[in-house]
Structure formats: C-alpha cells, structure tokens
Amino acid sequence: MDLDTLRGLVDSELHEELNGVLEMCNAPFAVSNGIELVSADRKSVKMKKTIVPRDLNSNGVVHGATSFGLIDHTFAVLSNLKAPAVGLSCNIVYHRPCTGPLIEAEAKIVNESRSLMTIEVQLSSNSKLVASAVCVGFKSKKEEK
C-alpha cells in the first residue's frame, strides 16, 4: 500500500499518523497473509482478507489461525494509532464456522487508560458474525501529542 491509497482510507484526523499506519499496513505478516485496510479513524479500524486455499483447515473451513491473524492485526493497528503498544491478552469466541470467501474484522476501543487499551474485535463473513474477541494492549510509550 502507498501513502496516496492510504490517505483515501483513513479519516483526515489521522493524516498526521499516516507513516505509522502505513508501516502497520505494510508489515510483513499483513502483506504475506493478504490483510488489507478498509478504513480507520481514532476509535475504530476495519480490515479484510480474501480467503485462499492455504487458509482452510482439514474440514474445509477457514482455519482458526487465519481468523485470529486478522483479528490480531486489526487490534494491533488500532492500538498503535496513538502510541506504540503491544498485546497483553486476547480472548476469542468462535460463534460459527467461517467459510469465506472474504473475512472482515472491525476493532473498536472499549476502554482506555494511561497504559492499557481494551479493544473489541468482531470478525464477520458473508454478513454474519463469525467470532468476537476482547484484546488488551499495553502502551509501551506515552501518547504522542
């Protein structure tokens, strides 16, 4: 992804942080797994992934690792918008099998303190909720102003 494309996907309030968002979107994990940004603002991030054959488990449905990878990266992008952060925990509940062909994740801030962020991520496919997660991130540096 390049800066011009990114500028069109994020809210104008994030234009000062474009380089950091671009770095997250072009992270080797995201690129090699086909994870793409859909939209972003200060309170939510949406990302998507097109399912390919290697993403399926032995039952022919999307592997849990694939689902979690999208959830975790969407959480990471949102939690790193204000300041560098790392994940502390993630509790995920799978509600139904995921069949693709496209999966989408939306992360939203639930609560934020000086050092912690609690973020809910919902994963959907075919307009149905597939999984939900509550992730906690630790801000490794104070917010930049």
Image (cartoon, rainbow, N blue to C red):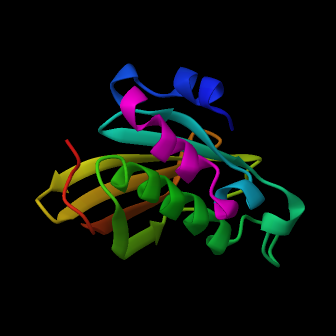
* Image coordinates for residue 64, horizontal then vertical, percent: 63, 72
Q: Quadrant of residue 2?
A: top right
Instruction: Answer above or below: position of 33 versus 5.
Output: below
Main SS of the magenta part reads helix
Residue drawn at (29%, 47%) of the image: 82
Residue 124 visible, this angle: no
Answer whether residue 16 is magenta in the image: yes
* Image coordinates for residue 108, horizontal then vertical, percent: 33, 46
Q: Quadrant of the N terminus?
A: top right
Residue drawn at (74%, 52%) of the image: 34
Q: Quadrant of residue 67?
A: bottom right
> In the shown orientation, is residue 27 left or right of residue 91?
right
Residue 114 visible, this angle: yes
* Image coordinates for residue 50, horizontal then vertical, percent: 75, 47
Residue drawn at (80%, 68%) of the image: 56
The residue closer to the viewer here, 19 or 124, is: 19
Q: Which residues are magenta?
A: 15-29
The residue closer to the viewer here, 78 or 23, is: 23
Residue drawn at (67%, 66%) of the image: 66
The residue closer to the viewer here, 29 or 50, is: 29
Instruction: Answer above or below: position of 75 versus 63.
Output: above
> In the shown orientation, is residue 136 left or right of residue 52?
left
Q: Quadrant of the C terminus?
A: top left
* Image coordinates for residue 75, horizontal then vertical, percent: 42, 57
Instruction: Answer above or below: position of 4 versus 94.
Output: above
